[in-house]
Amino acid sequence: MDWLKAPATEQGRAIMAGLVSPVDLTEGYLDATARAPLTPRIYARLTPDRARAESVAAHDRARAGLRRGLLDGVALAWKDNVDSAHVGTEAGSALLKGRVPQRDAGILDTATAQGAVCLGKTHMTELAFSGLGLNPPVATVPNAYDAALVGGGSSGGSAVAVALGLAAAAIGTDTGGSIRLPAAWNGLVGFKPTPGAVDMTGIVPLCRRFDVAGPIARSTEDCAEIFALIRGTTAPDLRGAEPSRLRLMVLDGLPFAQARKEPVAAFEAAVEQLAAAGASVTRAAPPCVEQAAALSPVLFAPEAYGLWRDQIEAAPELMYPPILERFRGGRDVLAADYVAGWDRLEQLRREWAAAVAGFDAVLLPTAPILPPEIERLETDPAFFASENLLSLRNTRIGNLLGLPAISLPTAQPACGIMLLGAAGGDLALLRVAAAAETALRD
């Protein structure tokens, strides 16, 4: 068995059973990263000394029967906006070149205390402000299916590291879709928790009211265990999750506007699989969704620009022009419009909760497009702008409405199906996703 491409939870059980050592797994990943030609475009920097020390400690605990949890000794990659002590954390931006934090972020510290092995930091979109993953000033992450295509953003390096067997699982962050989009485009599972469910101390921000960290992995169970790992809690019991008991709503309307045929076909086939497994599926298009989406320009960019204005305007030449333009899009939004926008969004969130109260989850395509070609994105600014907006259009719905969300792979490569849960209902959504995953894998 190729343990490097096994789910993180299977690796944990194998360590527990004495079938494989954390040291061998870590050395396997370090060797794989040394040999993989795409590693410089996936990892911003590796932490081999830390990884080896942590794997030896995990090995010793396993031999002594003192393992701290299922993922003790399992090697994870971390997005380069998650602080790691005495190791550069630059958030994919030349503006932060040479930035070296003195302590681990809260979630890395919590995961380390439970035995997780830190392999290193993965490349990302500049300051996390794009769904495509294009980052010419630093590194553009390739797609795991085709290196000529983008890997997705902003957590592209985290997703591709897992997809190519260069980490057991990885941590990303999600402000408008940055966990789910690269997960979908690389055939993985990506889980965005409810904002506030995860400690964001020591994570370089983009928009604090939307930012949240979460896992990218090979299965829903992996995501559930890693979600518990970074929170220091117990993972939910996913056993017995049955698709036949699910009440699901397909979100019609906006998610399908301008959508390409391949993601739509993959989504509809997945919905048919769920229905064939006994799930109850209905369709609706609550008007609050489009109304919430219309608020995006007065909510995301103003906060992002407000947080980064001083650094950006001190050295704008260091930034990739399309990303600089996105940040500056928030420069002229009136404070009154920003405050009114949030007030309106809170009302729309209440309308959404009432509209979907009878359902276990809401379904939509993770992305309405496939990963575009890197070369065209670099040479066609209008194409970059249009594809970037479309790439995040569906995922952003979950961010705007303050919901937990998870993307599952479909039978079509680079096409995902997304499930939205109820705000605060992270564990319930993971259980629903486990049931859906059963149907989609049959």
Image (cartoon, helix red, strand yellow):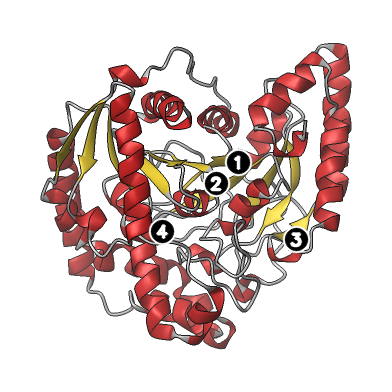
Mark seen at residue 201: 2
Question: If you read the primary sequence from the N terminus, does the residue marked by circle 2 or circle 4 appear first?
Answer: 2
Q: Which residue is mark 4?
A: 207
Q: What crowding class fits label 3: few (fewer than 14 Cα within 10 Å), some (14-19), or many (20 or more)?
A: many
Q: Please, is residue 382 above or below residue 193 in the view?
A: below
SS at badge 2: loop
Q: Nearer the viewer, residue 156 or 299?
A: 156
* Residue identified by numbered label 3: 39
In which quadrant of the rendered image does the N terminus lie? top right
Say whether residue 118 is visible. yes
In the displayed structure, would residue 158 be above or below residue 206? above
> Looking at the image, how many numbered discs can be counted on the residues?
4
Q: CA distance from mark 3 to mark 2?
A: 28 Å
- Per the rendering, the mark at residue 10 is none
Secondary element under disc 4, as helix, strand or loop, is loop
Which residue carries the number 1 mark? Answer: 106
x and y, in percent, of residue 271 in the image: 31, 37
**Which numbered disc flags the more N-terminal residue, 3 or 2?**
3
437 or 64: which is nearer to us?
437
Residue 19: which quarter of the image? top right
Kind of residue at badge 3: Thr
Q: Describe residue 158's horizontal placement relative to residue 198 as left or right.
A: right
Whether residues under marks 3 and 2 lie with C-beta atoms below 8 angstroms apart, the answer is no
Q: Amino acid at mark 4?
A: Cys
Q: CA distance from mark 3 to mark 4?
A: 29 Å
Query: In the rendered structure, are the residues bearing label 1 and label 2 in contact, judged by CB atoms less than 8 Å apart?
Result: yes
Q: Residues within 10 Å of mark 1 (few under 14, many from 20)?
A: many
